Amino acid sequence: MESAYKELCGRLRRIQVLGSVSGLLGWDEQVNLPEGAAGQRAAQAELLAELHHAAATDTGLCAAISACEQVLAAGGLDADARVVVAAARRDYDRVVKLPVELAAEKARLSSEGYHVWAAARKARDFSAFAPILEKHLALARREAELLGFGECPYDLAIDRHDPGLTAERIGGLFAELREGLVPLVRRIDARVAADKMCARTPVALRGFDLAAQQRVVRAVTARLGFDYKRGRLDVSLHPFCEGSGDDVRLTTRFNADEPLDALYSSIHEAGHGLYEQGLPSAQAGTALGVAAGMAVHESQSRLWENQVARSRAFWRWLEPTMRAEFPKELAGVDGDALHWAANAVEPGGLIRVDADEVHYNLHILLRFELERRLFNGTLAVADLPAAWDALSTELLGRRPEHAGEGVLQDVHWSGGAFGYFPSYTLGNMIAAQLWTAARRARPALEEEFARGEFGGLLDWLRAEVHAHGRREDAFALTLRVTGEALGPKALLAYLEERYGG
Amino acid sequence: MESAYKELCGRLRRIQVLGSVSGLLGWDEQVNLPEGAAGQRAAQAELLAELHHAAATDTGLCAAISACEQVLAAGGLDADARVVVAAARRDYDRVVKLPVELAAEKARLSSEGYHVWAAARKARDFSAFAPILEKHLALARREAELLGFGECPYDLAIDRHDPGLTAERIGGLFAELREGLVPLVRRIDARVAADKMCARTPVALRGFDLAAQQRVVRAVTARLGFDYKRGRLDVSLHPFCEGSGDDVRLTTRFNADEPLDALYSSIHEAGHGLYEQGLPSAQAGTALGVAAGMAVHESQSRLWENQVARSRAFWRWLEPTMRAEFPKELAGVDGDALHWAANAVEPGGLIRVDADEVHYNLHILLRFELERRLFNGTLAVADLPAAWDALSTELLGRRPEHAGEGVLQDVHWSGGAFGYFPSYTLGNMIAAQLWTAARRARPALEEEFARGEFGGLLDWLRAEVHAHGRREDAFALTLRVTGEALGPKALLAYLEERYGG
């Protein structure tokens, strides 16, 4: 019964196309939308969400899934189809169990929550935001109960971004990471302090021509392999990557005094974009045509941003381009100083999005721990600021002076986006493991980078990671590609190698 | 039974929102879409067209219309509601007669057609585009048959843009126009030739800074009243205006050697945008919230572009701004020469979008004649280039050297947009009639322009035209506002006054 499978794929494709239109509306909202059109756009987004929900809960979809399951039970269809049908069943069961009012309530709360959070952050007043967080947690718990995650509601939040992962499994990995990372960071911090006394303070890069920055960012991302015939680069307040297949859109932001911000945020987003451009487009809409999960997605952005683009070899290639585009701006900056600036380590930072790769994962360990305790009932919302400050002192070595640089700094919780933070650090672990495996597979990788050749790495990622879609979860994928279980060892070794001194 | 009417308006609003998403996809396709993403965009457009069709043919909509009709028959509801219900009935009856596959096929063909047309125009190869045109004509004929326009399929194409108008009625007005216009143009052409011998050759404007052009275009359109908090201006191959309500998007194109092209195409599109921004947004989706038709729409763009922005008074205001923005570019150009350049008449031009307002309507008479013949079966697609060339010689006095400056010059047919061209000339007629009426109502209008004040005219248009939505067709609207039947007399008088010498 090939026809049932064809019917299923057609319906999944339709849901995917609807989602892609919503995605475009979201992109346009952040890149183009006139300020007066927010209400009009909300009406469009709401209607598209309703249509998406209708397609995802259609009884015809359920019938097609059931028919495919029968064919599979009778020994028909292949292993690929089995993956697609299982994922479709899982997604369908999940979406039909949630009343549409719940989604509407969450959307409403998120919209309100964003404004309350922005005002609370400005006023450095957690108590103003606490009721929103309470309501989001209550909603998340109700969802978890409806979907059979009542025992461990945080697992649902995690599973949504990374199918197959749990708080317990991540907790084990993060405990192991913490054990190695905290002493390593202390050691690097001490070395950085010593370096600074020896005048290896990162140089300040100021007044970089914006048009030249745009040219560099575009040239670099194209050289890494991002296909501009199937994508774009635009400007938005916060960098992001949107779209899939033949229409993948990156955004960044340009500031004359932060040339490395535009460069590295663009490379980060291009890493996401390369993954999307590399997924099998013939399978669009099915589990074979989508990313394995957000941890693997973040591994791609981090690998290109950190392992590749902060390497000495990469800068050997990039430096002449930079000097040609910024002759005056870089007049007093030698090659070493430029490379140091791209690898600057700043101890004591409290803001996650400004953190260097040495400190970044400490910010995630903090958030994961707090989210986990909020969900398992061992931490009350009212006690969250004190818990944040204590953990900040413990992990980052500094206590925030106010909620704006502490518990209120991230937008995520205002929209009820729990369980996403761990993906960042899982992605960093996977990136380090992929990096080890890639260098083993292609020993001359860094010599290629120094010549501006990145196709070898991209081809390897295409074959090992991108082509597989969501066939495996992050654990299975990492094990297959690297020969090692997903874990913190490679990340610790990488940080040691690059920043250990 | 207010509830039936409320139900109807809600459903019409939903259809309008779906259409606005399709509109955004179309805007994005021409402004942003990566070249490799045409297929992906076509799939999105097709699905949205299908959903739009489903909403427009929903039996619940039919029930709501019927319920409202019963209430109206019983003497309930008001005159406004009567307009809305009648338009909804007409649209519903029309759309239920068209199978959904037809709409999807047209959307697909239009998306493909745009890319084929662009390539064919570049290659100056009509034969590459001919199959698209054949298919569009076949689709249009099938639609006409299904909708009861089998006797005169071109009437359906016209009626879609201008409800109530027919090929015969337009043919009569155009014959009357041609009779007066051809001798007038010949006379003006001769005067221009004589002027040129007296050195009043329009000055060549070259090397105009692009960033300054953008500033001027934005400042001028904002000054005319276009609200940039509820709209945008972008760049595309062919200028257009898309969107409604709080999100109206204009496009133009910039060329250092054609500063007046960007200026006038932007003012033209801003004229459309001012109309959209002036429609009653509370009525969005109903006949009270949409434009009366494309002829009236074009009257708005033409009025601002020609009657306003080519006037001596307008240039008295604009000249200092131009000199401030283009001090070097305009160093050798005096005020008269600048105004002449904006009113340059160039006999023998072959490109419609480059045509001055004296010759413009000749281009439309040509297209109307050819569309009419393509539809009534007296002209085959294969013979279209030869017919174009012959009529071009007859009306414009010149034969195109290749298809790119002849039959392939316009984008319209690539999307099956037949019956639109006549709206331009009908719009010119209406614009001239509105201009006469506006000056009668506000005798100091041109003195206001000279001071950069355009709110008087805009307010008058808002009250007389924009606020009325689609209450009347182009004939009724023109008669109400101007006191004269729609016809060519005011246009001929206006051209005589401004260019007759």
Image (cartoon, coloured by chain):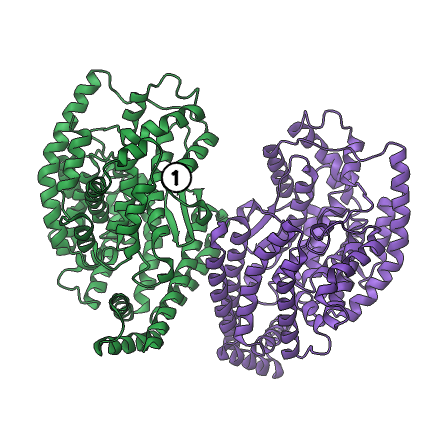
Chain colours: A green, B purple
Q: Which of A396 and B115 is in front in this view?
A: B115
The percent coordinates of residue A352 (x first, y second) are 25, 38
Q: Which of B355 and A477 is in front in this view?
A: A477
Q: Quadrant of residue B381?
A: bottom right
Say if B323 sits above or below A22 in the image: above
Instruction: Report the side of B110 relative to B362 (left or right).
Output: left
Would you say residue A203 is visible in this rendering?
no
Query: Number of labelled discs?
Result: 1
Say if A279 sits above or below B331 in the image: below
Say if A330 sits above or below A178 in the image: above
The percent coordinates of residue B310 (x first, y second) are 76, 42
Instruction: Report the side of A208 relative to A476 (left or right).
Output: right
Say if A310 sits above or below B467 in the image: above
Residue at (77, 59) in percent of width and height: B386
The residue at which mark 1 appears reads as A221
The percent coordinates of residue B13 (x first, y second) are 52, 66
Would you say residue B294 is visible in this rendering?
yes
Instruction: Report the side of A47 relative to B447 (left or right).
Output: left
Q: In which quarter of the image is residue B462?
A: bottom right
The percent coordinates of residue A449 (x first, y second) are 31, 34
- The three-letter amino acid code for the residue at tag 1 is Thr
Q: Is mark 1 on a helix, strand or loop?
A: helix
Name the subunit of mark 1: A
Instruction: Report the side of B168 relative to A333 (left or right).
Output: right
* Number of other residues with Cα within 10 Å of mark 1, as a class: few under 14, some 14 to 19, many 20 or more: many
Residue at (62, 31) in percent of width and height: B209
Considering the image in quadrants, where does the C terminus of chain B appear? top right
Residue at (24, 68) in percent of width and height: A86
